[in-house]
Image (cartoon, grey):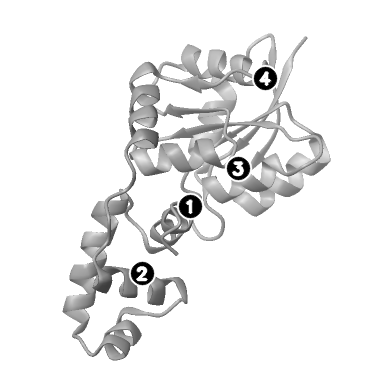
């Protein structure tokens, strides 16, 4: 019995390469999407067994939000994250959103195919080193933010730009950028949207 797969990646070359890799006897690609929004529509129409999804999808929904939305479908497909990013907070965020696994794009093609088969069977697909880091992350709470960093984060979550945050806190834009750098480091993220998402997941907002 073949496993049907939807590929979600914002790079056409990557999608084409994955389609070639996944042309196995028991794996059938039933669609490709460049955005999270497109993935949700296609998944609702084609009901794939597994969605192979990148973590970063350009503008719009990221892979974690897309995973959560896909898992809310009826019936929900298994979601396997395939990305170049291996930050602990992102691994944890993907699994908490309902992903069946997390693989890095550097793995051998046969590992991806086997991961899809395992995800379709309801198994958790994580490389041993990633599983160990995920477990450690669950045991160790995120570092505490200072009061000022928490204020910056709260304003960031309202959609305020650096200049607006600086005005609200009576500091310079350079100071705001410094606080953001510290926040990103503590949360293990590298974007404003991911900082807000991780902070919400951790109960910091």
- Above or below, comparing residue 30 to residue 90 in the picture: above
Check disc 4 and report its element: helix, strand or loop. helix
| Residue 45, x across and y down, in percent | 82, 41
Q: As drawn, is 20 to the left or to the right of 142? A: right
Quadrant hosting residue 67:
top right
Query: Which residue is at 33% across, 51% downward?
Result: 189
Q: Quadrant of residue 22?
A: top right
Choose top left, top right, bottom left or bottom right for residue 37. bottom right
Indicate whether 198 appears above or below 119: below
Mark 3 Cα-neighbour bin, 10 Å: few <14, some 14–19, many ≥20: many
Per the image, the residue denoted by label 1 is 201
Q: Nearer the viewer, mark 1 or mark 4?
A: 1
Q: Which residue is mark 3?
A: 67
Mark 4 burial class by Cα count in 10 Å: few <14, some 14-19, many 20+: many
Residue 74 versus residue 129 in the image, above or below: below
Q: Which of the two marks, 2 or 3, is nearer to us in this view?
A: 2
Q: Nearer the viewer, mark 1 or mark 3?
A: 1
Q: Position of residue 40 (x, y in %)?
A: 71, 47
* Label 1: which secondary element: helix
Closer to the camera in the image, 182 or 205: 205
Pointers 1 and 4 in contact (CB under 8 A)?
A: no
């Amino acid at each position: 019995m073949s496993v049907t797969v939807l590929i979600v990646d914002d790079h056409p070359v990557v999608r084409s390469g994955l389609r070639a890799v996944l042309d196995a006897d028991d794996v059938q690609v039933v669609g490709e999407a460049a955005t999270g929004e497109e993935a949700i529509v296609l998944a609702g129409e084609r009901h794939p067994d597994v969605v192979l999804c990148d973590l970063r999808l350009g503008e719009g929904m990221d892979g974690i939000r897309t995973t959560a939305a896909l898992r809310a479908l009826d019936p929900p497909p298994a979601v396997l994250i395939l990305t170049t990013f291996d930050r602990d907070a992102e691994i944890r965020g993907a699994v908490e959103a309902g992903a069946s696994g997390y693989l890095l794009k550097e793995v051998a093609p046969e590992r991806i195919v086997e991961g899809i088969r395992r995800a379709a069977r309801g198994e958790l697909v994580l490389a041993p080193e990633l599983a160990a880091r995920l477990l450690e992350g669950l045991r160790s709470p995120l570092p505490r933010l200072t009061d000022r960093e928490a204020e910056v984060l709260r304003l960031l979550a309202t959609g305020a730009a650096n200049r607006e945050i600086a005005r609200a806190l009576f500091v310079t834009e350079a100071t705001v950028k410094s606080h953001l750098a510290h926040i990103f480091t503590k949360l293990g993220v590298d974007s404003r949207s991911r900082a807000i998402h991780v902070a919400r997941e951790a109960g910091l907002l």
